[in-house]
Image: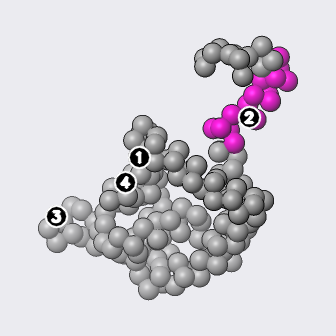
Amino acid sequence: MNTRRNEVPQDELSPEGQLEALYDRPGFLIRRSHQIAQALFEEEAEDIGLTASQMGALTVVHARGPLDQIGLARAMGVDRSTAGLVLSNLAQHGLINRVSDPSDRRRKLITITEAGLEALRNVQPAALAVKERLLAVFTDQEANDLVRLLKKLVDTLNTEVRTPLYRD
């Protein structure tokens, strides 16, 4: 590319060029890749009845032990209201418990139930199948490079967004 960073290349000014430019944009490709990953997860985990977000929440609660909604949101890199929706659904299905924090009765601590642990165990093969399906289009080296580069992107720009991921 022989253009300056913020200068639109001449071939992108036509409608066809604009469309191709859209399809080549990293943000578009990442969003579309996410849509594909979500659809594959829904297909693989259909019988289990968990969404990818619910699996993520159960994984965090299981790994981190009792934590509150804000802690869960930070560990997942989502906003509090999104975390709240996921938690409401999990609680409704008996997969988590919310109990008052003994040191602050206004704060609710989230723990995973036995049913939640079972659901988490049951969804693991589906999650692995999705990972394998997504990475199967690449050579082993390309798959490793993709994951490494995505991690670099996330790690480098994580703090520049409204809902950063906290790995505590």
Give the residue type at disc 2. Answer: Asp
Neighbours of disc 1 within 10 Å: few (<14), some (14-19), many (20+) = some
In the rendered view, does 125 fall on the left or right side of 57? Answer: right
Give the residue type at disc 1. Answer: Pro
Q: Which residue is mark 4?
A: 166
Provide the secondary structure element on which disc 2 rests.
Answer: helix
Name which of mark 1 and mark 2 comes first in the sequence.
2
Q: Residue at x 39, y 73 (%)?
A: 63
Camera-nearest label, 1 or 2: 2
Camera-nearest label, 3 or 1: 1
Q: Is residue 76 above or below residue 158?
A: below
* Residue segment shown in magenta: 13-29
Q: CA distance from mark 4 to mark 2?
A: 30 Å
Front-lying residue, 58 or 136: 136
Measured from the top left, where is residue 65 in percent x and y?
33, 73
Q: Which residue is mark 1?
A: 164
Neighbours of disc 3 within 10 Å: few (<14), some (14-19), many (20+) = few
Q: Which residue is mark 3?
A: 104
Q: CA distance from mark 1 to mark 2?
A: 26 Å
Give the residue type at disc 4. Answer: Tyr
| Quadrant where the C terminus is found in the figure | bottom left
Outermost residue on the front side: it is 141
